[in-house]
Image (cartoon, rainbow, N blue to C red):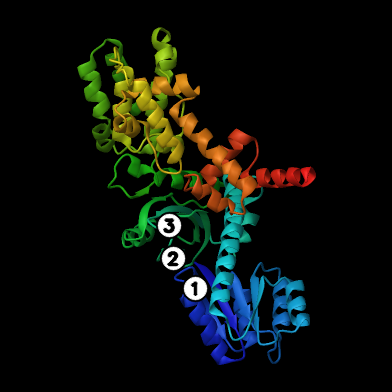
Amino acid sequence: MYRVVIVDDEPWALIGIRKLIERNGNRFKIICETTEPATALKVICEESPDVVFTDIRMPDMTGIDLMQRTRAKGLDVDFIVISGFAEFSYVQHALQEGAMDYQLKPLDMEKAEAMLDKIYRRLENKRSTSDLSCYISLLEEYEDNQLLLNARLRRNPYKRYQVVTVYFKSAEYDEMVLLDLAGKVQLSTLKLGPKKCVFIINSEEDQSELIYKSLTSKENVVDRAGISVSNDTIEHVSMLLKTSDIASHNCFVDHSKRISQYSKGKNSLVKKYAEEMMKALERVQYKSAKEMTLGIKDFFNTNGLGIEDAAFLWNEIVMYTSQDRENKNRHLDFEFLDYSEIKEKFMNLEMLGEYVYEQLSYQERDQLGDANNKFKELLQYTNKHYNEELFLKDLSTKFFINLSYCCELFKKVTGMTFSQYMTDLRLKKAAELLQNSNLSIADVCKNVGYSDYFYFNKVFKKNFGCTPSKYRKSSGDMNALNS
C-alpha cells in the first residue's frame, strides 16, 4: 500500500481526490489531507510519502514551490498536479519540475483512474528495483550496511537488529499494520515479490515474542513467515536476512508450522540418518529403505528439523549417487540444491522422500507402449502451464508415466532434467517479455511463475550472465542500433 499526501486550498477538491483514491481499493493509503501547503511540507519531510497530489495555485506556497522544496530535501517523492488552470505554461512548469502527471479540475474519473493505474505500476516498478537492490547489497555486503540502513531509517539506529520474512496469502495486503511492536523500534520494509515482504527491525530489545504474536493474530493474511534471532551487530544483518528466509520455508517440513523462528541445522544427526538409508538401499533391503524414506517426515518432526536440514539430507543422497558408478547413468535428476531450490523441486518433505525411494529402489520397469505419446502430452501441458507451480511427481501421475522413466525421458528428449527444463522455459519467456513488452520486471517475474524477485533475479543472472534490468537495457540498446 502506497502512502499519499493530498494538499489543495479548496476543501471540495480534497473530497474529490479522496473519493478517487478510496475507489481504488487498498493500493493507496492517505496519510495526510490538508488545505495548508506548509502542513503538507512538514508531513512530506517527516513521513516521506510515495506520492503527493497538489494544486498549483495556493496561498503562501504554490504547488511548484512545494515540489522544489521537497526536491531540495533530497526526498524521492512523486507528484501529481491537479489544477483548475489548463494553460500550457502551468503544465510545462509542473512537468519540468518532475511532476508525473497533470489533471484538470473537476476530475474526469475515467481519466483519473487510468492515471492512478499508471502511478501504481510506476511505484511498483520503482520499489521492486530499489528494494531488490538494497536487499542484495545487504545480503552480499556490497557496501557499508550501516549507511545503507540509515538511509531507510528515520531516526538514529537502536542497538539490536532482527529480520522477519513474510509471505502473504494475497497480493492485496497492508504491510504497514502487520507488526505490533513495543518500545523504541523502527523498521525498514523491503518488498521482494507480489506476496513477499522482508522487515528489518531496529529496536532496543528482542522483539521475537511480539513478532510471533502479531503474525499469528493475522493468519487470515499471512501465509507463512520466518523470524531471525536478534543481534546487536549491524555487520550480522546479512546473516539475519538469510536465516529469516530459511525459517520462512520451514512449512516445507511441517505444513502446520506456518510461522517459525530460525534454529541452526543438525547436520550430524541428518548425516547419520542418510547413511543408514543408503546402506539399506545398498544391501537391497527395500522394505527397510522404504520405511526410512517414507518416514523422513516423522524423523524431522521428532527432532525439530527444518528445510535447511532437508537440503542437507538431499545433498548427502546426491553425494551417495555420484559415487555409485555402477548405476550412475540411472540417477538422471540428482543434483546439488540449496534450500530455495529444494522448495522449487518438491512440494513438501513427503514428496522428497517418495521421490528418493522411487528413484533409488527402481530396478525394472514395464515401459508401456504409449509412454512416449503420454510424455509428449506432458511436455505440451508443461509448455502451456509453465507459469504455474509444477512438480514432476504430480505430472508423472497425471500422465500415467513411471516417475523414474519420466526422468529418463526428460533427459533423453530435451537433454535436460525436469528442473533444468522448467528453469530454461521460464527464463526464455522472461527474456521475451523483457525485450518485447513494457511490463515491469516485477510483473515479468510474476508472469513466468516466480513469486520471489530475489530468486528470479538470482536464477536469471546465473543463466544469462546479467540481471533482468541490465538484460532489458542491453536489448533496448541493441534494438536502437538495429533500427
In the image, what residue occupies the spot 42% across and 37% down?
344
* Image vertical order of residue 293 relative to residue 283, above or below: below
Depth order, front residue of 392/194: 392
* Image vertical order of residue 449 relative to residue 312, above or below: below
In the image, what residue occupies the spot 78% across and 42% down?
482
Quote the CA–CA distance across marks 2 and 3: 24 Å
Q: Which residue matches tag 1?
A: 29
* Element class at badge 3: loop
Circle 3 crowding by C-alpha within 10 Å: few under 14, some 14–19, many from 20: some
* Element class at badge 1: strand
Q: Is residue 331 left or right of residue 94?
A: left
Q: Position of residue 302 (x, y in %)?
A: 24, 36
Asked whether the residues under the numbered discs 2 and 1 touch, taking CB atoms below 8 Å apart as contact, a structural biologist would say yes
Q: Position of residue 6 (x, y in %)?
A: 58, 81
Q: Position of residue 315 (x, y in %)?
A: 42, 26
What's the amino acid at mark 3? Answer: Asp
Going from N to C along the chain, the mark reached first, 2 or 3, is 2
Going from N to C along the chain, the mark reached first, 2 or 1, is 1
What's the amino acid at mark 1? Answer: Lys
* Image vertical order of residue 284 relative to residue 23, above or below: above
Going from N to C along the chain, the mark reached first, 3 or 1, is 1
Q: Is residue 322 visible?
A: yes
What's the amino acid at mark 2? Answer: Asp
Asked whether the residues under the numbered discs 3 and 1 touch, taking CB atoms below 8 Å apart as contact, a structural biologist would say no
Specify the label residue 174 is tagged with: 2
Quote the CA–CA distance across marks 3 and 1: 30 Å
Depth order, front residue of 396/177: 396
Q: Position of residue 1 (x, y in %)?
A: 49, 66
Q: Is residue 265 visible?
A: no
Q: Which residue matches tag 3?
A: 206
